[in-house]
Image (cartoon, helix red, strand yellow):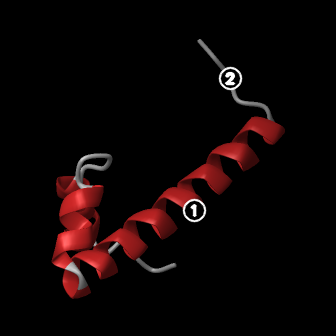
Amino acid sequence: MYHLDSLDETLVKKKHKILKLYYSVLYLLMEHFPHIAWYLNRFSNIQMIMVIKQNSIIDV
């Protein structure tokens, strides 16, 4: 079993915040600039954004 020490935990939390920010920005792009979102979709999972949106996790 792998246990996170406090340093790792803060890194994970920071990474999670960055991901939330990234996906909320990407979601805004989708709403306003669909063609940009289509291009970004090659590198990201748009469905993930929809899941985040449905669960109202976007509160950055």
Q: Amino acid at mark 2?
A: His
Q: Position of residue 29 (x, y in %)?
A: 31, 78
Q: Nearer the viewer, residue 28 or 48?
A: 28
Q: Secondary structure beneath disc 2?
A: loop
**Residue placed under numbered mark 1 in the picture:** 17
Q: Kindly tell me whether residue 13 is visible in this rendering.
A: yes
Looking at the image, which residue is at 23% across and 81% down?
A: 33
Can I make out residue 50 in this image? no
Q: How many marks?
A: 2
- Please state the horizontal and vertical placement of residue 55, each as a whole percent of the image: 25, 68
Point out which mark residue 3 bears: 2
Left or right: residue 36 compared with residue 47: right
Q: Quadrant of the N terminus?
A: top right
Q: Compared with residue 34, is residue 12 higher up or lower down, i.e. above or below? A: above
Q: Is residue 36 above or below residue 48?
A: below
Residue at the far bottom in the pictured view:
32
Q: Amino acid at mark 1?
A: Lys
Residue in the image at 39% along x and 65% along y = 23
The residue located at (82%, 40%) in the rendering is 7
Residue 42: give x, y in percent of width and height: 24, 47
SS class of the residue under badge 1? helix
Classed neighbour count for the residue bearing mark 2: other residues with Cα under 10 Å, few (<14), some (14–19), many (≥20): few
Instruction: Name which quarter of the figure residue 52 lies in.
Output: bottom left
Where residue 41 appears, as percent x and y from the top left, is 23, 54
Alpha-carbon span between mark 1 and mark 2: 21 Å
Q: Earlier in the sequence, mark 1 or mark 2?
A: 2
Camera-nearest label, 1 or 2: 1
